[in-house]
Image: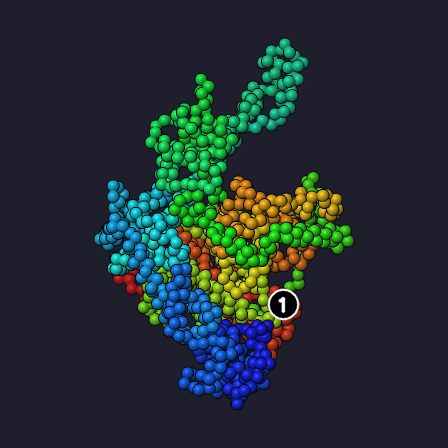
Amino acid sequence: MKRNWNEEELMEFFTLLPNDVDLAMKNKTDVNRLGFAVLFKYFQYKAAFPNQKQDIPSVVLTYIAKQLHLSPDLFHQYSWGGKEKTYTRHRQQIRSIFGFRTLTKQDNERLKQWLNEQVHFTHDTDYLEMKSYIQFRNWKIEPPSVGSLTRMIASAIDTYENNLYQITSQQLSPTTCSRLDALLEASIHSEDDAHIMEGSDEILTLRHLLASPGKPSVTTMNEEVKKLVAIRHLQIPDHVFKQMAPKLLQKYRLRAATETITKLHAHPTRIRYTLLSVLFWCRKMEIIDHLAELLDEITHKFGNRAETATKTEIIKELQKVDGKNKHIIDLLEAVVHQPEGIIQDTLYPIVTPDIIRNIIKEMKKSKREYKERIYTKMHTSYQGHYRRVFFAILENLEFRSNNVTHQPIIEAVQLIRDYANSGQRYFSIDENIPVQGVIRSKWQDVIIETDSKGIQRVNRINYEIAVLQSLRTRLRCKEIWIVGADRYRNPEEDLAQDFDDYKEEYFQALNVPLDVEQFISNIMQTMKDRLNLLNQGFEDKNNEKVKIITKSNKDWIQVTPLEKQLEPPHLPQIKKAVHNYWPDTNLLDVLKETDFHTNFTKHFKSIAGREILDRETIQRRLLLSIFGLGTNTGLKAVSAGSNQESYHDLRYIRQKFIHKDNLRKANAEITNKILHQRRKEVWGEATTACASDSKQLGAWNQNLLTEWHPRYRKNGVMIYWHVDRKSACIYSQLKSCLSSEVASMMEGVLRHCTDMEIDRNYVDTHGQSVVAFAFCHILDFKLMPRFKNIGSQKLYRPDTGMNEEYPHLQPVLSKPINWDLIRQQYEQIIKYTTALRLGTASAESMLKRFTREAQHPTYRALCELGKAIKTIFLCEYLHFEEIRREIHEGLNTVESWNAGNGFIFYGKNNEMRSNSVEDQEVSALSLQLLQNCLIYMNTLMIQEILYDNNKYWFKKMPVEDFRGLTPLFYTHINPYGTFKLNMDKRIPIKLKVA
């Protein structure tokens, strides 16, 4: 049971009703009355009895005792344990009152059967324990002891694993088993862990097969193709893990990837074959995704480079003629006035021959010539550098589409494969070449050439470039998908497969009506109300800070900047008091103390089959490792400062315990504890809003995630943060510099896994879109952006026939919402939103489907819905200054969080020096954890200062102080540790110093 309860929660769950009091008062002594009442309310809440007295929070005990007019200290005298008659009798009475019974042998078997079903989906023991307690409540059975339940869950997982090993090893062919063994044998006996592929002179290592791809290049493409061919050579069946839960796949993949080759080889055959099969089955999907990304990046790169180079060349060779029109007019007038004149005598004195030549050269530059030059450069680059590796990718990937419109691209890819070994410059005249839907209209006259006889021929290389560009476009919006991929898989697999069967339940889960007319009428009415509100504000002149003006002959919304608020008068002294009370506190001690308070390290469990080290040693090494990762100083530097732990010890902990999922759970634990520790009178009501923004960190560029950022002018990755209004970070994720911030925003709100209930999210301009407004509305939280381009925003009319409505808003009103589109696609909108809610599809993959290029019918409907919701928000944003200030303050909080990143992540010049994306993600999450620990301890420190000396500082604080109070400061923190100087210790140097 949680330790912190607010007044409302205590009243809801632990208030004694008159009947409850009567039952307690039937006991003869005050001690037994209090003991019975505590057990009664605890069981009513948990459907289980506490294991020990310490399980009952003191605030709960005090609240119950107060209702009985008794001292909570009496509970210490209450007899406890199975041998105590009073305690046993009380338990029997309480079970009887609620209709519960004790566990029987039949119930044990029933539970085992139920657990055996559940472990097919997850092996998270905390989650299984929680679900078991819910199941016991439903069955009205008193749960067994914690130890007994833990053993039953472990037994169910063990049974599942034994069955998995047995079934998997039976499904693998002798050829597959022998090749897996050969791979390990070669790795053991070779210094490079080499594996020689049959029929090839290429030597690949086991580490090579597991290595992350480098930066987008021909070399990287070749390497990834070789990996894919090598893994396919193992002949692991495609169906063997198709139905296995993704979390379980990840568990066994991580276990296999982090074990040494010797340890893998030492496993019994059924375990060895299963672990290796899972590892390479997952790697195959990852490599196919990598190849799709490389196809995307490289196709874009050589096309973009050709266009840039052509523009540069044209600018260099094309000298713009000053006064060109005047020169032409002068020449024409001279021709008209002296039609019989000699050119040399009549025209050259007016305009020199050089100027005339430059005018001719400039005017001859046609659009067709520009396109031809671009395509010539692409042709040269593709033929000389990229063509061979693209053939390899197209040969090894199988493309499909669920839309007949895009079948010509699939056919075009097959045509390229068929001609791969041909030396012909053109396709055969008799060949049926897909053109419509494959070649963009602007390139057709370049690709389809006409010879002297008037016969049209298709240039193969130019056609291949066009196909790759069309393929890239359709892959990005998932209109074309790849067999065997994960992120580029069949988009229908992203959706709930039983949606039609459980439609009502899915609509109910989103709290939206089944009837589309009711859904539309609610939004339409809200639009009318908000537009009326804004219009009335202009009419009554109550909204002086917003005006609609004309700027550059366009209608423009002008918003007066917010006035500066009063400075908090006492916050500097409060921060100084914190510094005086806890001067130069080591950041490592902050991490350690937070763990003592929250026990977040309990979430770091080994991915190996068992844990040999004692938990105290694991805890110590975990804290040192997290500190090294979160500060970016590294494990080696941290181990050098520790007398107990070596680099090898910390490296082992990093490999076996510190992974993305464990870090997310630990961060959620700390965030929840921050929320529970906050005192309402200091921090205000529990917040339900968060702000989102990204921060760039430098990173090595030999990977697919690192990109050049045009604004920051350097390579790096972005960390996208979700921070509440009092600086607790509830979620973080790593993203590339140019990937969608909208997708990251939605992912964080949906997946944060903390106790915080988010009902609104502040973002900057890049974190919003009309599609995002639509999805956020259906997911029941408000998207609240701060528009940089507020002046050019438009409002939409709620319906047709309203051209004369809202007279003060007419300049910025646009066309009415097309509600018919929403009516037609309403069910599909809910279906896609359900996929987001359930997590069967990531926000990024879902939003890729809905782009301007795809023009998906559901996309158009989402745009219309998003315009309606955006109009509602804009009306509120423009009418209420408080909303503009709320958003501004929220985004200031996340910007302050970004500023704190540099203080925590100080090692190696704030640069992630790893090309492994997994390592980069772990670093980002460790940074979040360290900074959250700082927030947690600062929250406790501030509260102690405010409540010290009979609330001296608390009573002095005006409203401005409470408004500006934040736990995000670090003047009292020493992030580096201690420096010891020993003047008596020398560095031994044998050679004599000159």
Side of 983 relative to 341 (left or right): left
Against 303, residue 163 (above or below) is: below
Against 112, residue 697 (above or below) is: above
Q: Residue furthest bottom?
A: 28
Side of 562 relative to 290 (left or right): right
Between 461 and 867, the one nearer to me in the picture: 867
Between 528 and 883, the one nearer to me in the picture: 528
Badge 1 is on which residue? 961
Against 547, residue 993 (above or below) is: below
Against 391, residue 778 (above or below) is: below
**Residue at figure coordinates x 40%, y 27% from the top left:** 431
Q: Which class describes the residues within 10 Å of circle 1: few (<14), some (14-19), or many (20+)?
A: many
Between 50 and 347, the one nearer to me in the picture: 50
**Residue at figure coordinates x 64%, y 18% from the top left:** 332
User: Where does residue 618 sit, x and y in percent of width and height?
Assistant: 36, 68
User: Where does residue 184 sit, x and y in percent of width and height?
Assistant: 25, 53
**Residue at figure coordinates x 53%, y 52% from the top left:** 833
Residue type at mark 1 is: Asp
- Residue 501 seen in the figure: yes
